[in-house]
Image (cartoon, rainbow, N blue to C red):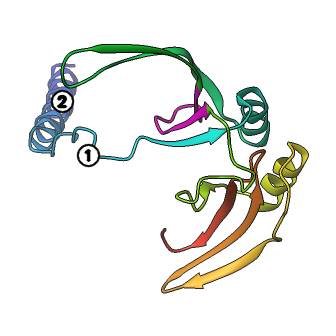
Amino acid sequence: MRRRIAAFTRRALTGSLLVALVAIIVASITAFAPARQAPLSPRFNHVMLYVSNLETSIAFYTSAFDLQVSQRIGEMTVTGPDGTPTTRQVKMALLKFPGQDFVLELAERSVENGGASPHLQHLGVDVRDIAAAAERLQKAGGRDFSGIRTVRTMGTVAKNTFFKGPDGESVELMELVSGEF
């Protein structure tokens, strides 16, 4: 009986030693692991579009994509370099994809008949299923569908299509097939 107790004690100690040794190794490795880096700065954080009707554009972008209105802005105070504040009424909305920080900023302002600003070429949106996203965008009111194309560059293959939004702004859907963008 004493031999069995002694053998059991040796195995228990060996097992405990093994657990302790593994814990020490794990702690040593994680102590030297690189720390998580702070978010990049500078980084892009928003794109702003002038729209002729804020409510129409909100309805379009929230229907076409899973964007959510994160903030509505009705008044803005800007303090100039001389310290003088100027307050004005505005009609703006900030839209975000759930779980993302990048903002689509919409501001109601008269838009010329030519559509979007000549300084904005297009708004690109990455999607996982371009056919389903294109159908959804058409149902939301997207117009001038270009058709789905395949684009190949050095090591990258993607499918894309273009639409026009409510004010004529160009919206690109892009599904990455292989490579990086």
Q: Confirm whether the magenta stretch covers residue 97.
A: yes
Main SS of residues in magenta? strand
Instruction: Give the residue pinned by disc 2.
Output: 7
Residue in view at x 41 percent, y 41 percent: 45
In the image: residue 58, left or right of residue 45: right
Q: Nearer the viewer, residue 116 or 133?
A: 116
In the image: residue 122, left or right of residue 43: right
Instruction: Give the residue pinned by disc 1.
Output: 42
Residue 129 picture quarter: bottom right
Q: Confirm whether the magenta stretch covers residue 85.
A: no
SS class, disc 1? loop
Q: Position of residue 21 (x, y in %)?
A: 12, 37
Q: Position of residue 14 (x, y in %)?
A: 15, 34
Residue in view at x 66 percent, y 34 percent: 67
Q: Position of residue 84 (x, y in %)?
A: 26, 14
Q: Are marks 2 and 1 in contact (CB under 8 Å)?
A: no
Q: Position of residue 34 (x, y in %)?
A: 15, 46
Q: Magenta segment range?
A: 93-107
Residue 108 picture quarter: top right
In the image: residue 124, left or right of residue 25: right
Split into 4 quadrants, where in the image is the N terminus? top left
Marks 2 and 1: which is nearer the front?
1
Mark 2 surroundings: few (<14), some (14-19) or many (≥20) residues within 10 A: few
| Location of residue 20 with respect to 152 vertically, above or below | above
Of pointers 2 and 1, the one earlier in the residue sequence:
2
Q: Tell me the kind of residue under disc 2.
A: Ala
| Location of residue 89 with respect to 38 vertically, above or below | above
Q: Nearer the viewer, residue 29 or 176?
A: 176
